[in-house]
Image: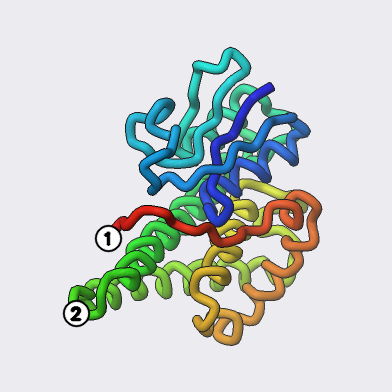
């Protein structure tokens, strides 16, 4: 059986967990805090980042969420989480949505850890820049959801990588930045996200915080 090394709040790992669940692929979940000195992540990923998917030989590791999702779709194409190959523009759009969602997460991770510094060491311009990126990304997602006109899914009538990416990002955003006003600013995006959260694969992978043992900033 495969093993997925994950962190409980990670939106990147949640994408993979949802994809594995949707494809009906059994796996063992190994929870880690990649920032801690005791992490085993570096044994499988030279970049020391999660998620990492370890195959059943216990050695072969697939890492970086974009690549894992691509690998899964290539190796286990059914049920598909991308539109059919003939719908090339829809496939590219789904991947574009993932890029925006991961970009939001990247910016928010930087903003989150900036807040962990001692107040006198924090850079407000730096934090503000990261939040501008997040807000710009949210506006793009809100526009795309508005264009879907109340549909359950962003592309066509089935769950795709785009929905998984948006749902994973918004779940983490809400956990780490509970005071952000995105839900009132983008009501259609909120309604769409709430619909995704009722799906079994989403409901069973909701993020939760972890305690960091080591100082990271």
Label 2 SS? helix
In the depicted structure, whether residue 175 falls above or below residue 4: below
Q: Residue at x 73, y 62 (%)?
A: 197
Question: Which residue is more in the foreground, 169 or 188?
Answer: 169
Residue 58: image location, x then y, percent: 56, 17
Question: Which residue is more in the foreground, 105 or 52?
Answer: 52
In the depicted structure, whether residue 156 falls above or below residue 4: below
Say left or right for 187 vs 176. right
Residue at mark 1: 217
- Report, in whole angstroms, how far the alpha carbon at label 2 lies from the one at label 1: 13 Å
**Residue 174: mark:** none
Q: Residue at x 36, y 63 (%)?
A: 107
Label 1 SS? loop
* Residue 213 placement: quadrant: bottom left
In the depicted structure, whether residue 73 falls above or below residue 126: above
Quadrant containing the N terminus is top right
Scheme by which the image is coloured? rainbow
Quadrant containing the C terminus is bottom left
Residue 83: image location, x then y, percent: 65, 41
Is the residue under label 1 in contact with that under label 2 (CB below 8 Å)? no
Residue 122: image location, x then y, percent: 23, 75
Say left or right for 196 vs 165. right
Q: Residues within 10 Å of mark 2 (few under 14, many from 20)?
A: few
Residue 23: image location, x then y, percent: 74, 34
Q: Please tell me which of labels 2 and 1 falls first in the chain.
A: 2
Question: Which residue is more in the foreground, 56 or 144?
Answer: 56
**Residue 120: mark:** 2
């Amino acid at each position: 059986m495969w093993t997925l090394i994950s962190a409980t709040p990670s939106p990147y790992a949640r994408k993979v967990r949802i994809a594995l669940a949707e494809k009906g692929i059994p796996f063992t979940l190994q929870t880690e805090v990649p920032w801690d000195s005791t992490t085993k992540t570096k044994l499988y990923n030279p970049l020391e980042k999660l998620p990492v998917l370890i195959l059943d030989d216990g050695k072969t590791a697939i890492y970086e969420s974009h690549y894992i999702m691509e690998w899964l779709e290539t190796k286990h194409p059914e049920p598909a989480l991308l539109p059919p190959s003939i719908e090339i523009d829809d496939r590219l759009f789904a991947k574009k949505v993932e890029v925006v969602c991961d970009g939001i997460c990247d910016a928010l991770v930087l903003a989150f850890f900036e807040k962990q510094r001692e107040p006198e060491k924090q850079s407000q311009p730096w934090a503000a820049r990261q939040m501008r990126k997040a807000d710009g990304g949210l506006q793009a997602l809100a526009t795309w959801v508005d264009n879907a006109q109340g549909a359950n899914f962003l592309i066509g009538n089935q769950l795709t990588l785009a929905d998984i990416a948006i749902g994973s990002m918004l779940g983490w955003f809400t956990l780490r930045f509970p005071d952000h006003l995105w839900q009132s600013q983008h009501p259609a995006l909120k309604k769409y996200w709430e619909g995704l959260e009722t799906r079994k694969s989403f409901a069973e992978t909701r993020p939760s915080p972890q305690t960091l043992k080591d100082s990271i900033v």
